[in-house]
Image (cartoon, rainbow, N blue to C red):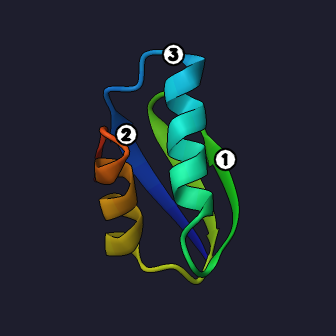
Amino acid sequence: MATTLTLEGLASVADVNKVTAALIEQDGVDNVEVAREWAQVEGQARRDVLVKAVHKAGFKAK
């Protein structure tokens, strides 16, 4: 299953890497692709868990 998140606040490659790391650490995530405005997450992780991980990393997601 794939989940697409809309991201806000990412301004650099370092920000993209930070969000990628935050998402890939979540249980049920198999693969992550992140750009400045979106993230595509493959796996069984719940959307609310993914959004919370992005927020904890310091960015907005919906």
Name the element at disc 1. strand
Disc 3 from disc 2: Cα separation: 13 Å
Decide which of 37, 24 is in the foreground and name it. 24
Residue under the point 52% across and 79% down: 45
Q: Could you tell me residue 56's position as x and y percent?
A: 31, 52
- In the rendered view, does 47 fall on the left or right side of 58? right
Q: Which disc is residue 50 wearing? A: none
**Is any part of residue 4 visible from this angle?**
yes
Q: Amino acid at mark 3?
A: Ser
Disc 3 from disc 1: Cα separation: 15 Å
Q: Is residue 22 above or below residue 27?
A: above
Name the element at disc 3. loop
Residue under the point 50% across and 43% down: 19
Q: Earlier in the sequence, mark 3 or mark 1?
A: 3
Q: Could you tell me residue 46's position as x and y percent?
A: 43, 80
Q: Could you tell me residue 28's position as x and y percent?
A: 61, 81
- In the rendered view, does 6 fall on the left or right side of 22? left
Q: Is residue 21 above or below residue 47?
A: above
**Is any part of residue 35 visible from this angle?**
no
Q: Amino acid at mark 1?
A: Glu
Q: Which disc is residue 7 wearing? A: 2
Q: Nearer the viewer, mark 3 or mark 1?
A: 3
Q: Could you tell me residue 1's position as x and y percent?
A: 62, 78
Are the residues at dot 3 and dot 1 in contact (C-beta closer than 8 Å)? no
Among the 4 quarters of the image, the one containing residue 51: bottom left
Decide which of 11, 25 is in the foreground and name it. 25
- Residue corresponding to mark 3: 12
- Residue corresponding to mark 1: 33
Report crowding for label 2: few under 14, some 14 to 19, many 20 or more residues within 10 A (C-alpha). many
Among the 4 quarters of the image, the one containing residue 11: top left
Q: Earlier in the sequence, mark 2 or mark 1?
A: 2
- In the rendered view, does 19 fall on the left or right side of 44? left
